[in-house]
Amino acid sequence: MQTKPAWPSINLLVQPLIENLKRDVGALRLSQTILANGTTIIDGGINAQGGLEAGRRIAEICMGGLGHIALTMGAGKWPLSLHVHAANPVLACLGSQYAGWSLSHGEREGAFRALGSGPARALAQKEKLFEKLNYRDSAASTVLVLEVAQVPPPALIEKIIDDCNIAANQLTIILTPTQSLAGMVQIVARVLEVALHKVHALGFPLEQIVDGVGTAPLPSPAMDFLTSMGRSNDAILFGGRVQLFVDCGDDEAEQLAQQLPSSSSRDYGKSFGQIFKEVNYDFYKIDPMLFAPAQVIVSTLKSGKTFRAGNVNEDLLDTSFS
């Protein structure tokens, strides 16, 4: 029986990526601001232009230094795609990349609200998911990625610092609006993470996930938030493809393959933007089982058998991306 090594510190692994991003802000068309308290803010598309490479590198930071993301060109009407794989997919995707830290400041209209992703989550431990993962990180420096179009208010930044138990000058916050190229890249790069999050929601043992890889087409961002958000979701729901390697029996692997694709959801069949409109823009009224890749391949290492389910939906991609 093979023993599993202890999980590494994602906050330590990611530090070289953060330093390289700061070094290359000019080349990547990003901007960097150091606040009065010493916290670093990196603008990935609010006032800075950013771009594809900036988004790719920010997405790898989201994965805690455990992921590799590549831009590829293939065939078809939407040839530009993102390819994602990770050295440890469960830790990289669920322990770091998943946008699970709910942050807010203010109660009136215009209050700041965001979901934080990246290694800082493993320091703050604000999500029950970390109990399931049995993972707690410890480090002096950290990074948090927010999909927003404004800088967080000072009071919220101080809360993040306190929750992570670090000095203010050891925090880096990266901002990537959905309407930006960098923002679109880092969202679509979550195709593998979306699959693993649904794996967890289905109750499949995460310890039986050995490895995984994902790919999804990369749409152009739109000028408005809702259209961009719709396209980023549709890229995964109707164009995402994931292969998982699992350590379980054939029956369990086949059942996972059948349950995992987005087409298993009652809400499947319409673009995300149309679904969102029909539920009066209440995200929580959407069937959570919809959030999954379009096509799934599950290979079990015990028997070597592979099971497939779902298909890429070119018609819905065309409707969304066009």
Image (cartoon, rainbow, N blue to C red):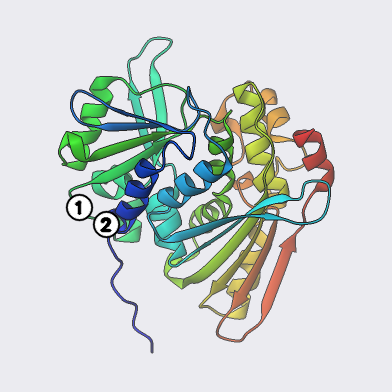
* Neighbours of disc 2 within 10 Å: few (<14), some (14-19), many (20+): some
Q: Quadrant of the C terminus?
A: top right
Q: Residue 185 location, x and y as percent?
A: 57, 43
The residue lying at 48 percent from left, 57 percent from top is 200
State which quadrant residue 213 falls in: bottom right
Element under label 2? helix
Of the numbered discs 2 and 1, the one sitting upstream in the chain is: 2
Element under label 1? loop
Pick whichever, 149 or 103, lies toward us.
Answer: 149
The residue lying at 73 percent from left, 28 percent from top is 274
Q: Residue furthest front?
A: 27
Q: Residue 68 location, x and y as percent?
A: 50, 60
Q: Is residue 4 above or below residue 310?
A: below
Q: Is residue 160 above or below residue 154?
A: below
What amino acid type should be assigned to the residue bearing mark 2? Leu
Total number of numbered labels?
2
Callout 2–callout 1 Cβ contact below 8 Å: yes
Provide the residue designation for mark 1.
Answer: 139
* Neighbours of disc 1 within 10 Å: few (<14), some (14-19), many (20+): some
State which quadrant residue 296 falls in: bottom right
What amino acid type should be assigned to the residue bearing mark 1? Ala
Q: Is residue 110 above or below residue 302?
A: above
Residue 31 is tagged as none
The residue lying at 41 percent from left, 49 percent from top is 61
Provide the residue designation for mark 2.
Answer: 12
Whether residue 273 sits left or right of residue 122 in the image: it is right
Q: Residue 97 location, x and y as percent?
A: 43, 49
Pick whichever, 13 or 16, lies toward us.
Answer: 16
Q: Is residue 46 above or below residue 298?
A: above
Q: Residue 78 location, x and y as percent?
A: 78, 46
- Label 2 – label 1 distance at C-alpha: 7 Å
Q: Quadrant of the N terminus?
A: bottom left
